[in-house]
Amino acid sequence: MATKTTPKTEEKKGGLGRYFRGVKSEFKKVVWPTKDTVIKYSIIVIVAVILSSLLLLAYDKIIMFLFGFIY
């Protein structure tokens, strides 16, 4: 059971150029979002971050208030 091994020089043949051609062809397949979609999703993310920050702030204040009774 002999297997054919390829020299390292054959594996690298056209390596970088072939890589960038592959990247270019993959970028052509990407469906980019519209400007309105990006703005809508960005607003949703910003609102979610603000709400989660306020929730963590409320938890922190409640815990600090409860620890105030212990000390």
Image: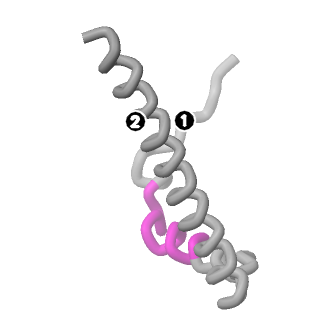
Q: Is residue 52 above or below residue 38?
A: above
Q: Position of residue 41 (x, y in %)?
A: 66, 72
> Relative to the observer, which residue lies in front, 40 or 18?
40
Q: Position of residue 7 (x, y in %)?
A: 45, 44
**Stretch in magenta:** 12-23
Q: Is residue 39 above or below residue 14?
A: below
Which residue lies at the image location 47% right of the left edge and 50% below the top edge? 53
Q: Position of residue 55 (x, y in %)?
A: 53, 44
1 left or right, relative to 49: right
Q: Which mark is residue 59?
A: none
Q: Earlier in the sequence, mark 2 or mark 1?
A: 1
**Image quarter hosting the C terminus:** top left
Q: Amino acid at mark 1?
A: Thr
> Relative to the observer, which residue lies in front, 6 or 58?
58
Which residue lies at the image location 59% right of the left edge and 73% below the top edge? 42
Farthest residue, direction left: 71
- Does the CB distance between marks 2 and 1 fall below 8 Å? no
Q: Which mark is residue 5?
A: 1
Examine the image and state in which quarter residue 29 appears.
bottom right
